[in-house]
Image (cartoon, grey):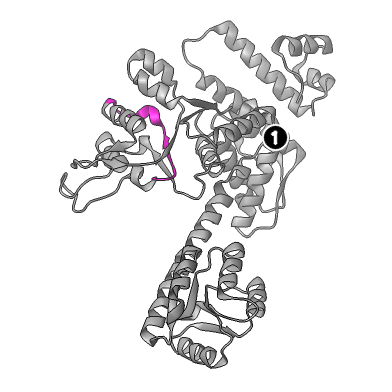
């Protein structure tokens, strides 16, 4: 560890001891602030980055115990070392129970002191790394990163808020690109497990044999290439949340093993026999119809009901179009910041086309389109002509939509769905003015009103 990056605050009302400590610790490479007044030292903590506090126990006005209590209340991540005389060791031990990292006896051995400080500095470094990691993850994946103010998204977040505090397993369903992992992370960060690990596994990314080792770990020599014991994702997630994406891809054998873990909260590593207990919350996601798979005999019914305690369905982007301007603004700002570009905007016409598009790839596709435009367009405003062809070319949009339809379908129902989609798109492009939307579609205003009532379209 680089001692020069470790800042020590030393507090002792005995000036001679203070000078000795300061010299010894500076010579060891630490940055040292030595103060004889505890109140001044506590005020110093308000404005300074301190890694470790070393304080004498018996001082006038403010004792070492009071310093410890104030530090633990206001700066709980800072390790505190207590200096005490031999006769006060019992009191020092009591202070350790209150949160002190260690105690140093006076007169102290230089080696003993430096070892205690080194251990405390290492603890401080680990705390610092953890805080940075946690704050980074929470900023990137916390609940506030889910963008949307539509009714569908308000209902979704209400469901997340109610489900998060419980221990219940959660099944998130939705089309690809709708943000299932983002919702899983929101559940984790809103739960009491938020300070524990969030571990994510895409079940479709591994073949069955590799996935078993990935999930449960393996013992040394359990198969060719297993040169050492390896802990799996279940162990890594102990105390926290395990997110299994694309859970519908699990083989029958792994379905049985997952069911057992959910029932007993224990498992064995591949090639091992020892029972490993874990305390985890399992959240799963899929874009497949698991109930249909149950009826087809490809997914275990008992596992389905274990996973589907709380069901959170994610709406596709086309069903929450009012969120598209918010998402566009968010992705634009994010991309400009990441690429050191001045903030760009989309013209009203371009934004209307983005809102009117069907987005078969959902939010992920929208993000890719926004990033492409931000990076490739040199001006500060992105116009309709600068959108990708599939967005602005209505013939291409129509052909793409038709190509995505299954060969066997109910023609009448499909035509009605297409008509409803065209009416919604016309309303968007006409800024939700019905008369103008009617002209775009070449129909009368009265027919437009009839169609709006028929399809339950209310405008925004």
Question: What quarter of the picture does the N terminus occupy?
Answer: bottom left
Q: What residue is shown at x 70% (from left), y 51% (from top)? A: 344
Residue 403: percent from left, percent from top:
51, 21
Total numbered labels placed on residues in the image: 1
Q: Is residue 227 above or below residue 75?
A: above
Residue range in magenta is: 238-252
Q: Is residue 372 above or below residue 51?
A: above
Viewer-proximal residue, 158 or 98? 98
| Residue nearest the observer in this picture, 177 or 441 | 177
Name the residue at 48% across, 72% down.
91
Pick the front one: 380 or 182? 182
The picture places residue 25, in percent across and down from the top left corner, at: 47, 86
What residue lies at 75% left-to-right and 26% top-to-bottom?
460
Tell me: 79 left or right of 430: left
Residue ID for mark 1: 149
Q: Residue at the front extreme? A: 87
239 in the magenta segment: yes
Q: Is residue 250 above or below residue 335?
A: above
* Quadrant in the picture for residue 238: top left
């Amino acid at each position: 560890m680089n001692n020069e990056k470790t800042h020590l605050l030393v507090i002792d009302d005995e000036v001679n001891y203070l000078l000795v400590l300061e010299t010894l610790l500076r010579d060891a490479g630490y940055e040292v602030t030595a103060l004889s007044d505890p109140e001044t030292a506590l005020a110093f903590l308000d404005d300074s980055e301190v890694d470790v506090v070393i304080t004498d126990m018996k001082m006038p006005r403010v004792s070492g115990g009071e310093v410890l209590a104030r530090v633990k209340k206001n700066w709980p991540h800072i390790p505190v070392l207590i200096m005490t005389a031999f006769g006060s060791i019992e009191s020092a031990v009591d202070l350790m129970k209150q949160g002190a990292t260690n105690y140093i006896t006076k007169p102290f051995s230089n080696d003993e002191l430096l070892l205690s400080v080194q251990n405390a500095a290492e603890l401080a470094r680990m705390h610092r790394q953890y805080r940075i990691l946690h704050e980074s993850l929470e900023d990137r994946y916390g609940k506030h990163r889910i963008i949307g103010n539509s009714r569908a998204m308000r209902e979704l977040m209400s469901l997340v808020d109610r489900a998060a505090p419980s221990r219940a397993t959660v099944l998130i369903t939705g089309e690809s690109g709708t943000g299932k992992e983002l919702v899983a992370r929101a559940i984790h960060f809103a739960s009491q497990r938020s300070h524990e690990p969030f571990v994510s596994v895409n079940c479709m990314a591994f073949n069955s044999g590799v996935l078993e080792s990935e999930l449960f770990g393996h013992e040394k020599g359990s198969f060719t290439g297993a040169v050492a014991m390896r802990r799996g994702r279940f162990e890594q997630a102990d105390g926290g949340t395990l997110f299994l994406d694309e859970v519908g891809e699990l083989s029958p054998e792994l379905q049985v093993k997952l069911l057992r873990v959910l029932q007993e909260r224990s498992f064995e590593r591949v090639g091992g026999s020892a029972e490993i207990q874990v305390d985890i919350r399992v959240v799963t996601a899929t874009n497949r119809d698991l109930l249909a798979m149950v009826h087809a005999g490809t997914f275990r019914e008992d596992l389905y009901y274990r996973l589907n305690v709380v069901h959170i369905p994610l709406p596709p982007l086309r069903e929450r179009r009012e969120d598209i301007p918010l998402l566009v603004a968010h992705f634009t700002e994010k991309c400009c910041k990441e690429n050191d570009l001045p903030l760009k905007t989309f013209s009203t016409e371009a934004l209307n086309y983005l809102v009117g598009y069907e987005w078969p790839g959902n939010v992920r596709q929208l993000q890719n389109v926004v990033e492409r435009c931000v990076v490739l367009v040199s001006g500060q405003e992105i116009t309709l002509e600068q959108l990708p062809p599939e967005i602005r070319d209505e013939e291409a949009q129509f052909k793409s939509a038709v190509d995505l339809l299954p060969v066997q379908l109910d023609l009448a129902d499909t035509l009605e769905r297409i008509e409803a989609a065209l009416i919604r798109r016309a309303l968007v492009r006409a800024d939700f003015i019905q008369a103008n939307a009617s002209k775009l579609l070449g129909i009368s205003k009265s027919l437009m009103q009839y169609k709006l009532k028929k399809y339950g379209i209310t405008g925004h």
